[in-house]
Image (tube, grey):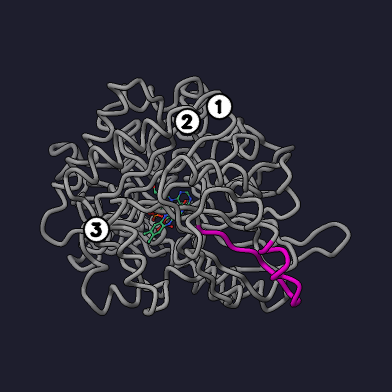
């Protein structure tokens, strides 16, 4: 290693001052790394906030890597030190509970790898017979993958609702949306990964080679290594999308019809939508999706029932026959309110990038960079009606949380891979995603307290939920979260990140 530069000495001094006060660290940071290590207040501030804007933990330094070797050197220095420091890969920091932060550690700003890749961050290969795939840098955004693949008439198969998220960030969670019930979460559509482990080793892993690392990293909350490349499954893309919202006045009909639509064996199997989600409509819900002329009618329905449930479906198509498929799909549904089916016809890109349109509007109103006390949970199918009564009606409606954005849609266990680290409820074939996606400039605690009441309602009622993108206060809560997967998770941590360097913001091993 080269001798330490003034920046290196500064970095070490900061570290010493904070963690071991009297001992001098025997680490010499090579100049090529220190040039990319920033300790100025601007860099520190940026690395201490996320989309949640609730947790703000300051790192000592931020690495803007100009190569994968920069990250490897950073990890090696920590791993070989008697006083290892923590390291968090930061995608876009779209986490809501500080998961990409590193208190008194180092944050790696993954987006700076873009310059190193020099436009080669997304490489498309394959053919019709063996299948297409894209090799994508862990720092890349899904929107960029979509644009690059669409240029070749191709597309990834599984998505998140919002596309300005990174490959490494969503694969560390699961990556779910309306396509998940058919195609599985994003983590099940990955063929190969390049990972830089917590020991500073580069490993290429697949379901056949270095399998323990492969399965651990997928849904692994950044605990085992930094994903530097993922090979993503592609399929031929369709050009257009029929995008429907179908309204229900009661939960039972709504969930019955949702389950009919996702059934792989039922009569509607041939007309399964490509995308299925669901939402609550309440008195303060925005109605921008619907024509202005229909607002009065929808508002009356909401006033009558308090909560209106909507199924959101999309079918992708290239030719004009799509109307027939949509009609057949609607025929398989039993309980929607007649006259309350609304349809849009948009491009594939417009549909997948729909949340970005909302982002633009919210940014203009100053409502994007504000606290987001989000709660996402998976509820077993057998208890979803109890959840409707207890959480939607008795908590949301009674306490007048009628501006909340709430997603509700079913997923199939069979589309998940048990070997991966991601956690879903035990046993049942169908479980529901419920997302409470609130934003509040001045009173996020009220929403957070309400969310705690919702979780407590589940605990009291014996509803065996699992959190998604969640945060837990203690290690015991994490052990409970992982359930039967905990032992494997812990063993993989000892194997790939024994010094517990990586992703401390998840607070699993660094509480
Ligand atoms: P970050 O928040 O930066 O990081 C998340 C975690 O992954 C951290 O622990 C970090 O250290 C680790 N990490 C980051 N990069 C890497 C890497 N390369 N290798 C290893 N670990 C890494 N999620 C869904 O599943 N479905 C949705 O529909 C959905 N919609 C969303 C909509 C919005 C508006 C927002 C803000 C988020 C949404 N999310 C959704 C959540 C999103 O998946 C998470 O925020 C996720 O963490 C991705 O964000 P990110 O890429 O900014 O990762």
Residue 230 x %, y %: 61, 54
Residue 64 x %, y %: 38, 65
x 47%, y 30%: residue: 380
Residues marked 1 and 2 touching at CB (< 8 Å): yes
x 62%, y 43%: residue: 260
Q: Is residue 183 on the magenta stretch?
A: no
Residue 6, visible in the rendered structure: no
N-terminal label among 3 and 2: 2
x 40%, y 27%: residue: 481
Please give the residue where the numbered disc 3 appears in the rendered image.
Answer: 403
x 49%, y 74%: residue: 115
N-terminal label among 1 and 2: 2
Quarter of the rendering occupied by the C terminus: top left
Residue 5 x %, y %: 30, 62
- In this view, 85 is above or below 402: above
Mark drawn on residue 428:
1
Helix or strand or loop: what does disc 3 sit on?
Answer: loop
Please give the residue where the numbered disc 2 appears in the rendered image.
Answer: 380
What segment is highlighted magenta in the picture?
312-327
Residues marked 1 and 3 touching at CB (< 8 Å): no
Task: Please name whichever residue, 82 or 281, is drawn nearer the observer in this view of the structure.
Answer: 281
Q: Is mark 2 within 8 Å of ligand 1?
A: no
Q: Residue furthest left?
A: 442
Image quadrant where residue 384 sits: top left
């Amino acid at each position: 290693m080269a001798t330490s530069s003034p920046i290196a000495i500064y970095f070490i001094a900061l570290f010493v001052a904070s963690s071991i006060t009297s001992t001098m660290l025997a680490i010499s940071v090579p100049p090529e790394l220190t040039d990319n290590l920033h300790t100025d207040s601007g860099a520190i501030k940026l690395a201490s906030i996320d989309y949640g804007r609730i947790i703000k933990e300051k790192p000592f330094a931020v690495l803007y890597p100009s190569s994968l070797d920069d990250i490897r050197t950073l990890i090696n220095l920590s791993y070989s030190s008697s006083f290892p420091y923590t390291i968090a890969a930061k995608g876009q920091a779209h986490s809501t509970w500080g998961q990409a932060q590193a208190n008194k550690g180092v944050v790696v700003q993954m987006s700076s790898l873009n310059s190193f890749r020099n436009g080669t961050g997304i490489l498309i290969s394959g053919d019709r017979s063996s299948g297409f795939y894209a090799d994508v840098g862990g720092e890349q955004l899904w929107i960029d993958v979509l644009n690059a693949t669409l240029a070749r008439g191709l597309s990834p198969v599984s998505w998140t609702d919002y596309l300005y998220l990174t490959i490494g960030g969503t694969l560390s969670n699961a990556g779910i949306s309306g396509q998940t019930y058919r195609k599985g979460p994003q983590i099940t559509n990955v063929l190969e990964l390049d990972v830089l482990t917590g020991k500073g080793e580069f490993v290429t892993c697949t379901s056949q080679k270095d399998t323990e690392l492969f399965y651990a990293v997928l849904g692994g909350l950044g605990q085992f290594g930094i994903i530097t490349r993922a090979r993503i499954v592609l399929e031929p893309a369709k050009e257009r999308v029929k995008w429907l919202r179908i309204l229900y006045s009661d939960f039972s009909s709504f969930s019955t019809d949702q389950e009919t639509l996702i059934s792989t064996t039922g009569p509607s199997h041939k007309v399964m939508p490509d995308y299925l989600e669901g939402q609550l409509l309440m008195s303060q819900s925005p109605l921008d999706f619907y024509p202005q002329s229909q607002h009065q009618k929808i508002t009356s329905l909401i006033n009558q029932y308090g909560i209106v449930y909507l199924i959101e479906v999309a079918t992708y198509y290239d030719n004009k026959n799509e109307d027939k498929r949509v009609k057949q799909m609607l025929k398989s549904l039993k309980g929607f309110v007649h006259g309350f089916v609304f349809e849009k016809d948009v491009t594939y890109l417009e549909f997948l990038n729909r949340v970005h349109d909302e982002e633009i509007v919210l940014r203009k109103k100053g409502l994007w960079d504000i606290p987001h006390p989000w709660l996402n949970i998976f509820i077993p199918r057998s208890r979803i009606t109890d959840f409707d009564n207890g959480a939607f009606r008795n908590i949301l409606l009674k306490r007048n949380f009628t501006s909340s954005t709430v997603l509700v849609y079913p997923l199939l266990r069979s589309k998940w891979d048990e070997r991966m680290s991601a956690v879903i409820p035990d046993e049942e074939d169908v479980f529901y995603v419920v997302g409470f996606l609130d934003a509040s400039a001045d009173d996020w605690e009220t929403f957070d307290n309400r969310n705690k009441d919702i979780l407590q309602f589940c605990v009291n009622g014996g509803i065996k939920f699992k959190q998604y993108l969640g945060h837990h206060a203690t290690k015991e809560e994490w052990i409970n979260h992982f359930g039967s997967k905990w032992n494997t998770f812990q063993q993989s941590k000892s194997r790939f990140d024994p010094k517990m360097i990586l992703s401390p913001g998840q607070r699993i091993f660094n509480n």
